[in-house]
Amino acid sequence: MERNAMLEHDPFIPVLAEKLHIHGYYAFYGEHYNETDMEQYRKHLFTTFNNIVWIELDERKKYMIVDHRGRNTVMKLIEGMLNTRRTLRANQAMAGTDTRGVDQEIAHFSKQVHMLKFTTFRP
């Protein structure tokens, strides 16, 4: 309860709302943000935005998306990360190194892109 009361006066919420209006998404970097935090932000922002999508690429990189424009930008960012991972996998394969970790990352990022492609936002 105390956390909810504090969130109502959190100066980050108006900043977050402004960034979401301008860009359509907001990137959260750092391990300290989790799904519970995002659910609290979502509750406070839902009066402003009809659609709020939260995706977690890894423990350090998470995105909140509110419209098609934000979705498309985040998909492009993930595609760039996928290209980097594919290059890393190819280099590891040529060096004879195990590629399972990179393969798992590629599969996870590909699933996120697939999910975002089929996410629809109400006007």
Image (spheres, helix red, strand yellow):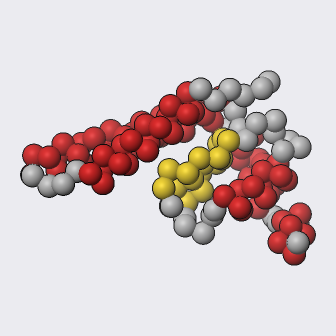
Quarter holding the N terminus is bottom right
**Is 60 situated above or below 103?**
below
**Is 109 situated above or below 1?**
above
Can you give x and y, in whole percent of width and height, for residue 3 in the image? 83, 72
Q: Is residue 15 visible?
A: no
Q: Residue at x 30, y 50 (%)?
A: 102
Q: Residue furthest bottom?
A: 2
Residue 87 occupies quadrant: top left
Can you give x and y, in whole percent of width and height, for residue 40 in the image? 79, 58
Q: Is residue 33 visible?
A: yes
Q: Residue at x 73, y 41 (%)?
A: 52
The answer to whether residue 73 is left or right of residue 40 is left
Foreground: 51 or 108? 108
Q: Residue at x 26, y 51 (%)?
A: 100
Can you give x and y, in whole percent of width and height, for residue 26 in the image? 64, 48
The answer to whether residue 73 is left or right of residue 18 is left
